[in-house]
Amino acid sequence: MKSFFVWIFEIIKMLKWGLLIIGLMVLFYFIWQFQVTEEVHPGDALKDERPITLFNPVLYDYEQNKTKWRFAAEKADVFEKRKLMILDQVKGKVFSRDSKQKTTLVFADSGKIKGKSKLIHLWGNVRIILDTNRRILTEELFIDQQKETIYNEVDTLALSEHDSINASAMVYDIKTSLLILKQPRMEFTLDSKEKQL
């Protein structure tokens, strides 16, 4: 009789260990599954929605019958569910509310317009021609329509006829044509008359 109870007791001990091992395996499986789903890249989220592709679109934004900006692109992918538009080979004009101000020209390899956020994100070989004829070269740029500013937080090169300025960031106020450069480093080019002095 003792052997039967000992045998039952041994089976129960084995079941405890088996259940513990199976429980740990299930726990590790769920942890692993959770980590795999966490490692989704931002671009992958767009793959579940097929975009509407537009070729050579021209986009406008108006406020009180005045054009705020006009952008043209070689191609635009429109993701309707996300209210997102991805642009390729972007050319654009940003207008000041003051009609006396000149237009700011913008060029970039790629761009993104998200919903009604009034924020345009441009990246890749970004070039700007300000109304002061100063040219800006950078890799990333944001155009905030609410604040009427153009800004970035990456290395920027500002060029004019007589100088070049390297900076770590920039803010350009469209209303006042004021350019602010963060940590500027300037190089001058002197005319031949100035060199003789």
Image (cartoon, rainbow, N blue to C red):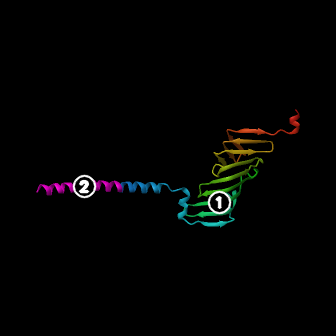
- Tell me which corner region of the image, top left, top right, bottom left or bottom right, holds residue 109: bottom right
Residue 160 appears in the figure? yes
- The residue beneath circle 1 is 87
Residue 66 appears in the figure? no
In the rendered image, the quadrant that contains the C terminus is top right
Residue 29 shown left or right of residue 100 in the figure: left
Q: Earlier in the sequence, mark 1 or mark 2?
A: 2
In the rendered image, the quadrant that contains the N terminus is bottom left
Q: Residue at x 71, y 43 (%)?
A: 179
- The residue beneath circle 2 is 14
The x, y position of residue 96, in whole percent, is 71, 51
User: Does the magenta segment cover residue 7?
Assistant: yes
Residue 87 shown left or right of residue 27 in the figure: right
Q: Which residue occupies the foreground of this view, 55 or 61?
A: 55
Stretch in magenta:
1-25
Residue 132 shown left or right of residue 115 in the figure: right
Residue 37 shown left or right of residue 20 in the figure: right
Circle count:
2
Q: Amino acid at mark 2?
A: Met
| Above or below for 44 versus 139 | below
Magenta span main SS: helix
Q: Amino acid at mark 1?
A: Leu
